[in-house]
Every structure is written in structure tokens, then in C-alpha cells.
Amino acid sequence: STRIVLASRPTGTPTPDNFRTEVVDLPGLSDGQVLLRTVYLSLDPYMRGRMSTAKSYAQHVELGDVMVGGTVGQVVESRHSGLTVGDYVLAGTGWQSHAVINGDEVRKLDPDAAPLSTALGVLGMPGFTAYSGLLKIGQPKEGETVVVAAATGPVGSAVGQIAKLKGARAVGIAGGPEKCRALIDEFGFDAAVDHRDPEFAQKLADAVPDGIDVYFENVGGHVADAVMPLLNLYARIPVCGLVAQYNGADLERRDRLPGFFSLVLVKSLTIRGFIQSEFVSEMYRDFLRDASGWVRSGELKYREDIVDGLENAPEAFIGLLEGKNFGKLLVQVAPE
Ligand code: NDP
């Protein structure tokens, strides 16, 4: 089995030498276990947090351990009563070509119901993040304005489209004219604003003539700065991620907190951080039902950015934090 381990911890932007490729022998199977070959590996912004020992909601990856990650795999050998050779499963086996894992820790996928890759994107963790964070915390109402950044990514694109399904106006923020065009033409947002535009703050203001009722926070940084003065009374802010700050020391920044709190007070804002896993037991079934239906009917579109070969995972991951991906970033580790 080929695997990519964490070789060293990054300071700032990760570099290729933070990763190391190894070839190892896999153990034989015990009762209840399966051998999987990885087909797709999901690359996600949260992995930057796992590379660091800074305090977080989840345990960091130890040096020398395989990088974590969601995967779609196929059963190659089975000693689990519920799984047979050839089955496709959703697993969390990380950055490796093969893995031995307890069969109870995977979920069987129906390859005829939806493309297998969607289990890591629109019909998986990122799609659920959008669905749960927007509906539970954002609670968009008919005619309200919802703003989201990283809007062509798997979370943001679903946020905008679900907001529209609920009758709200969706304004997307993305990096570059090509992504902004896709927001309108492909995903059906009402307006798109390029955060790299020197006049970004003014253009965002122009795009939200009635102010902002829901700001789904994916990025932080200069985008959050531009959004704050545009928030309406009683605006809701699901704080989902701060990808603009993951590579820097910004996450620790507290200097403008008093000014921010006065905004929270005078605008009666609701700000609520969340990690999607907290809503799984309550909402995952509803999500799968709704999102599968919307994908089938064409109301929920998704875009994938598939990189070929496990060896290209580090470079693709580094690019994800800089906006080089265009859609849900996946590595095709082996053919289906
Ligand atoms: P994306 O595929 O959207 O990738 C991240 C995107 O962030 C980049 O493509 C880039 O898009 C944008 N970005 C990067 N740097 C900046 C910057 N400085 N300013 C503005 N935008 C920037 O990722 P996901 O859809 O997978 O994730 C989106 C967010 O959701 C992340 O913050 C992630 O951590 C969070 N998340 C949170 C979860 C939770 O449970 N709370 C679960 C899953 C994801 P562009 O080129 O448009 O700038």
C-alpha cells in the first residue's frame, strides 16, 4: 500500500516537504475487517488544522501518521458479514491506496443511486455542512439576502442554491471572474462578487441593496471585514470556517473585538459557530432525502475538481487553501 504521512508541521502555508510518501505492507484481516482499495480521496480545508498542534475541535495528526481524510473505497477482501468483495463504501481511510478497516466503520454506497464521488461532496460531509448550518442557524426566509464566500466550493455552492430553494436571494463571493461567472450561469446565484477585485467592498455593497440577513461565514479575513457594515438588524451568521486564516496567525487575532461587539449589540446579531457533526443525528436523514431529490431534479448542481493520482494530493491540498481548486476537490486514487 502507498500512503502519504505527515512528515513535519507547517508554519504558515504548507509545503510539499511537510508530506512523505511511504510504501508499506498491510496486515492480514481479522474477523469483522475488510481490505479496501481507495478510489476517491476527499481533500478539505479542515486538514490544515489537523497538521497543526494548535487547540482545535479535533485531534491533530501525529508526525509519521497517515494524513486523515474521507474516502470512497471498494472492498477487495472481506471478513465482515455485511460486506462483500466489489462493494463500494464511504470510509475515512485517509491518504492511502489501500487500508484494512473494521467493516462497522464504513457505510455502503449504491453506485446506481448517484455518482460515487458525490458521497464526498454534494451528498456528503460538505453538502451536509451547508444544509445544516444554513437551515438550522442561518434560517433564511423568503425575500431575505444570503451571502456566502468560497461560493463555488462544495459548501458555498450548496449554501447559495439551498438559500434560493427557500426563497431567499443568494449572493456569492469567489476569487476571479471565471468563478464569478459560474456562480451566475452554473449555480443560479442572483449576484456574484470577486473578492480579488480592488473595489471588492464597494461591489459587495452594490450587490446587496437591501443589506445582508444571513452571512454564512466560510472564509473570514478581508471578506468578513467587507460584510460586517452591511449586516441588517437581526442578521444571522453561521460561522462554518475561516479558510482565509488557516495558514496564518490571524485565527488568534482579537484586536478589534470591542468594536465587533458593539456591532453585535446595535444590530442584534446572532452568531453561532458549528461543526457539522453536531447535527448528524438530528438532520442527516433529512439531508440525504432532500439533497438527493434536489440533485436528481437538477435544483442542486455541483462541480468537482478531480486530480489524478495519490502522489498529487499534497500539491492539490496546498492549492485548495489558495483557491486553486474550482469545485469539490477530490483525488482519483484508482479507477472505479
Ligand atoms: P472550498 O472547496 O470552497 O475551498 C476553499 C476555498 O476558499 C478556495 O477555493 C477559495 O475560493 C477560498 N479562499 C481561500 N482563501 C481565501 C481568502 N483569503 N479569501 C477568500 N476566500 C478564500 O472548501 P469547502 O467548500 O470544502 O469549505 C468551505 C469552508 O467550510 C471552509 O472554511 C471549511 O473549513 C468549512 N467547513 C466547515 C465545516 C464545519 O463543520 N464547520 C465542515 C466542512 C467545511 P476562492 O477562489 O473563491 O477564493
Image: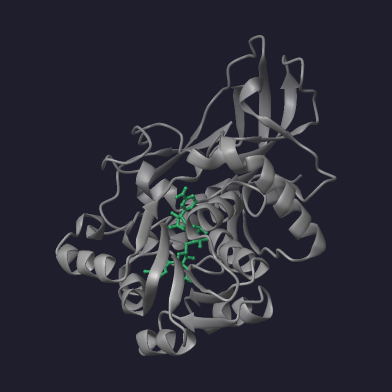
Q: Is residue 10 left or right of residue 291?
A: left
Residue 35, percent across and down? Answer: 67, 24
Q: Position of residue 135 (x, y in %)?
A: 56, 56
Residue 138 appears in the figure:
yes
Identify the image quadrant of the N terminus: top right
Of the 4 image quadrants, the one containing the C terminus is top right
Residue at 80%, 25% in the rendered image = 85
**Up/down of 146 relative to 29, above or below:** below
Residue 242 placement: quadrant? bottom left
Please say if 61 is above or below 33: below
Residue under the point 55% across and 64% down: 153
Q: On screen, 205 above or below 327? A: below
Residue situated in front as seen by the camera: 139 or 155: 139
Q: Is residue 261 left or right of residue 298?
A: left
Which residue is nearer to you in this view: 133 or 201? 133
In the displayed orientation, state which residue is furthest to the top: 31
Note whether residue 69 is visible. Answer: no
Left or right: 111 as drawn, with respect to 220: right
Q: Where is residue 182 shown, x and y percent of the image?
A: 62, 78
Q: Quadrant of residue 74?
A: top right
Looking at this view, is 116 or 288 the one in front?
288
Please tell me which residue is depicted at 52% across the width and 50% down the height of the picture: 43
